[in-house]
Amino acid sequence: MATMTGSQMVVECLKEQNVDTIFGYQGGAVIPLYDALYDEQENFKIIRPAHEQNAVHAADSYARTTGKTGVCIVTSGPGATNTVTGIANAYMDSVPIVVITGQVATSLLGKDSFQEIDITGITAPITKYNVLVRDIDQLPEALSKAFKIAKDGRPGPVLVDIAKDVLMGKAKFVSRYEKETKTCVPGEDTEEKALNIARLINESEKPVIYAGGGVKTSRAQDILLDLAEKNSIPVVNTLMGLGSIPRNNRLSLGLVGMHGSKEANLAVTKSDLIIAIGARFSDRVIGKKDRFAPGAKIVHIDIDEAEIGKNMQVYYSHVCDLKESLESMVDHVESNDRKSWIDEIETWKVDDGIKESDFAAKNIIGAISSKFSGDPIVVTDVGQHQMWTAQYWKFNGKTDFVTSGGLGTMGFGMGAAYGAKTGNPDRNVILFVGDGGFRMSCQELVTISKYKIPVLIVLMNNSTLGMVRQWQKLFSNKRYMETDIGDDVDYIKLAETYRIKGVQVKDMESLKQFLDSFEDITEPMLVECKLSKDDNVLPIVPPGVAIDELIVKTY
Amino acid sequence: MRKYVLSLLVENNSGVLSRIAGLFARRCFNIDSLTVGTTEDEALSRMTIVVTGDEQILEQIKKQLNKLVEVIKVVELSPEESISRELVFIKVKADNDTRSNVIEISNIFRANIVDVAKNSLILELTGDAAKIEAFTNLMEPFGILEFIRSGATGLQRGFNVLKEN
């Protein structure tokens, strides 16, 4: 057993966990930790953001797109508080990350010392677990536990706060590493429960699968598709679940809820059986609760027992790893073409009236989607462009979709884009971001530039906080308060300041020219699409009404 | 809506109490009372939490508590299969005219007199909620100066234990 410093133990534990990428920012309390990393630079890729919040978004996106746990290292006090939004984002979207924060020395704790903040107190409600390590002998266990908990069951963020004297102290290193174990062993009842759900499906006339982010977390996309196809069950997706079934499949109805398609929302409303898989009945999906799928039995399959009955009372539930459940189920489901149900749904599809030549989000996203038809990673920020991407990207089953779902974090996209690319150097990464969210995060151009991270930034610039403006237009009598943010920034010059190529396009022709000018994304690029501030995300379900009362067109 | 009594076995770490209290606050669950203390195992603490709600809220509370890493076990203490008691101190006005009446009632309830002053008595009573309420009602006419209750604490009846080996 070797004697080493606490900092060296942290590095050792990271190596045990096969961590090779760290998103982090230096600072007083983590100087010893970075000092230990000095000798390990060949073993770790370390990305320094411009601001700690984006280190967490990057780690979050890295985790979502690699299946590994994202890791952040930041200093105490403001370094730690800057991670809070990022941690909350990962918590809401159930993403496994481990955030290591430096803390003041134990002798200074509780005295309002310089850069001391109670970060475990602050982050208690937004982490699965957090701990302040005050004793070097507890350090290996704290870290091992952190990685285990982050991935266990329903994933999520864990924060480990380490006092500076622990990082500098010396002790014998006793490894507490535990091999990753299967977190959800199928219970004895899995077969029986799956059989019961299969029976409900076989007996139903109008079933709908409501698939959420859990499908992607448990890597159950293929088996979901098998199940849907065998019994011809239409599939609607939550925002987090998009990409779990190819969008061009006849059974895919796309997004459901507030900005769901008419056919998706009506299918749910008219259904007699909803099979919720890895979804949590968010208010953005269910609309007016007592009119959500009023004629349906609801079956809920999820790994988190607390989700059962939290937002919606259900008829039958199965707490299990989704993949196990679906695998057991598929054999018991009968083949069926459900012609009348599928035909009925087909009649609900409406033409949105957008012409092919219009320089509208639908066509912009359509064109970019057609160009990157392989296995791209599509990242969004938050707002109108996010919903448009969700609606119009042609998810093909190999596309990863990274978006801030639960928290709706403007400014998420930039960090998320380079986090995804860092973990997936061979895949094209495209970021859609609005001008509002871009202004919150454009300092990260320096990170993209410094590490030469080749991502394509599509800036959907309508000079306004479009989603809020749309609400003002539709529901507040066009009283545009604090939403027009002006067009006084030259984003192309801004990109060029950071030595990033920037192009502005104002019509489909010039967008296509730009897209034709390269094959894969091999350098950081920004393309600014100038849009009308009056373009809306449609359909939209007004607040407080049922999801079948959606507005499909505005005049 | 009714009252439920939950018994929790938790790790004996600093911060556990605030984590549990925080969970209740964040999820808009109401704590009527909470008691916590050490157990036969020094690594563990035991909490008794009384909550008001319906079956659905109780179910959610139990599930959310079970998600906390430091929470080892949660059980509901049903009135039939458990015992729970509460300790109260009542400081009541008592002068030469009323003192013997107060003492007489206290004796009936097996309340202890723990402090005697010229114009007051402090009474100590242990019991379930119904007994405490009955006693308090009888003391009220004398004039209750101060009143404190510990919150319920309880155990399951029989050989059952929370800690699994």
Image (tube, grey):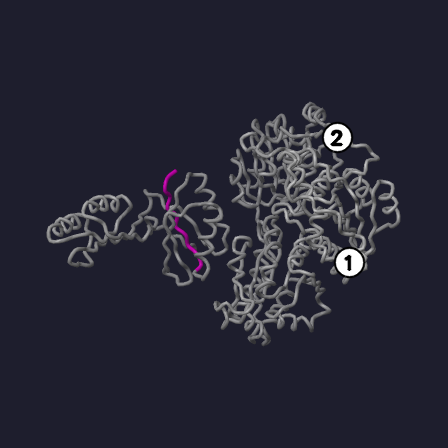
- Residue A470, compared with residue A78, is above or below; it is above
According to the image, label 1 marks what residue?
A453
Magenta run includes residue A246: no
Secondary structure under the numbered disc 1 in the rendered image: loop
- Report which residue position mark 2 lands on: A352
Above/below status of A494 relative to A215: below
The part of the image, by quadrant, that contains residue A354 is top right
- Separation (CA) of disc 2 from disc 1: 37 Å
The amino acid pointed to by label 2 is: Asp
- Quarter of the picture containing the N terminus of chain B is top left
**Which quarter of the rendering shows the C terminus of chain B?**
bottom left
Circle 2 Cα neighbour tier, 10 Å, few/some/many (<14 / 14–19 / ≥20): few
Whichever of callouts 2 and 1 sits on the residue coming sooner in the sequence is 2
Question: Which residue is located at x 33 percent, y 51 percent?
Answer: B151
Circle 1 crowding by C-alpha within 10 Å: few under 14, some 14–19, many from 20: many
Residue A304 placement (x, y as % from top left): 55, 46
User: Main structural element of the magenta stretch: helix, strand or loop?
Assistant: strand
How far across and down, in percent of the image, does residue A456 sit?
79, 51
Residue A529 screen position, x and y as percent: 79, 45
Q: Position of residue A225 (x, y in %)?
A: 70, 38
- Callout 1 amino acid: Ile
Residue A276 or residue A522, whichever sits in front: A522
Q: Are the numbered discs 2 and 1 placed on the same chain, yes or no? A: yes
Which of the chains bears the disc numbered 1?
A: A
Q: Which stretch appears magenta?
A: B1-11
The chain letter for the residue carrying disc 2 is A
Nearer mark to the viewer, of 2 and 1: 2
Placement of B131 over or under B117, stated as above or below: above
Q: Residue at (15%, 50%) from the top-left corner?
A: B102
Left-right relation of A65 to A307: right
Name the secondary structure under disc 2. loop
